[in-house]
Image (tube, rainbow, N blue to C red):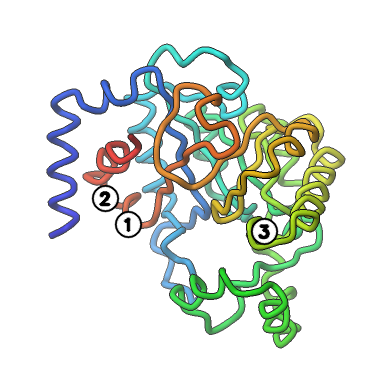
Amino acid sequence: MRTLLKATVARAYAAAGGLRRLHAGRVVVLTFHRVRPDGEPAAARPMRNLEVAVSDFRRLLAWMRERYEPVALADWIGRAAPPARASFAITFDDGWADNHEHAFPVLRELGLPATIFLATGAVEDRTPFWWQMPGLSDAEIELLKRRARPEIEARLAGHPDLRKAHALDFLSWEQIREMGASGLVQFGPHGHRHALMASLPRAEALADLRRCWALLRERIPGALAPVFAWPNGDARDDLAAELEALGLRAAVGTGRGAAATAAAARWNLPRNNVDRNVARHPGLWPWLLMRAN
């Protein structure tokens, strides 16, 4: 019932020209995580709400392309002037292997640019994310996000086989280079350990970010987007000078919204998460955009 109500309100708003007015000369940045095969049986893994089916992914992007101008995130951030018309940019977080297997073919088919923010510990060291520990519910994961890092590390120590079990979950450098060579996909830093930056001492947060950015500059110098994605959107306001000194031009968070230029909120630009429920209900696509205000 709630889905029907949201869809009805959003469609009426769009039909009245609300979306055209709302996003004229602005960019809506979409965030995806995992793109999975259609009809995949429910897997015993957490955070399923951040996975979208490949056919839903294709339909949504085709629908967006008909209504908004696609832009590469780094290109938009490098411009001082707003876009000529309502625009959108595609981003992915973390560095999942299915971004190459399932999302990349759709991007090529539709000719759409995208930016993937890599947690380099998963790519370089094949280190799983802590929330991949077996038995964690999504509610428990949300609670644990705010716990001290040593507590999480201690829990991880109780699962010595976790790395082997999830080694194939993440992109390889070979896959990353292939996508980068297409000219459609660029890559930005998402932290080495995907640690919540505001929960770390300042020096530790900087060291983690520097390691991530150094790996990207070493491994894929020709496919970089000089944009940092705050892990979990956990932004802090005391690192702007250091981010800029590293050669980064902006940072993105997880707050909903749209922007005309990066200057509006350079170190915590808005992005709009596309979850499993929104992706599979076309009636909610205008709702997603209506909330990006």
Query: Could you say which is closer to the camera, residue 13 or residue 111?
Result: 13
Vertical order, 67 against 4 (above or below): above
Q: Residues within 10 Å of mark 2 (few under 14, many from 20)?
A: some
Task: Name the side, left or right, on which 188 lies relative to 141.
Answer: right
Q: Residue at x 42, y 54 (%)?
A: 52
Quarter containing the C terminus: top left
> Label 1 near label 3: C-beta < 8 Å?
no
User: Residue 263, labelled with which disc?
Assistant: none
Quarter containing the N terminus: bottom left
> Label 2 near label 1: C-beta < 8 Å?
yes
Q: Residue at x 32, y 57 (%)?
A: 277
Q: CA distance from mark 3 to mark 1?
A: 25 Å
The image quadrant of residue 30 is: top left
Q: Secondary structure at mark 1?
A: helix
Q: Which label sits in the foreground, 3 or 1? A: 3
Q: Residue under label 1, please give it.
A: 277
Q: Disc 2 marks which amino acid?
A: His
> Label 2 near label 3: C-beta < 8 Å?
no
User: Residue 194, labelled with which disc?
Assistant: 3
Give x and y (percent) for residue 173. Answer: 78, 48
Task: Name the side, left or right, on which 208 lies relative to 251.
Answer: right
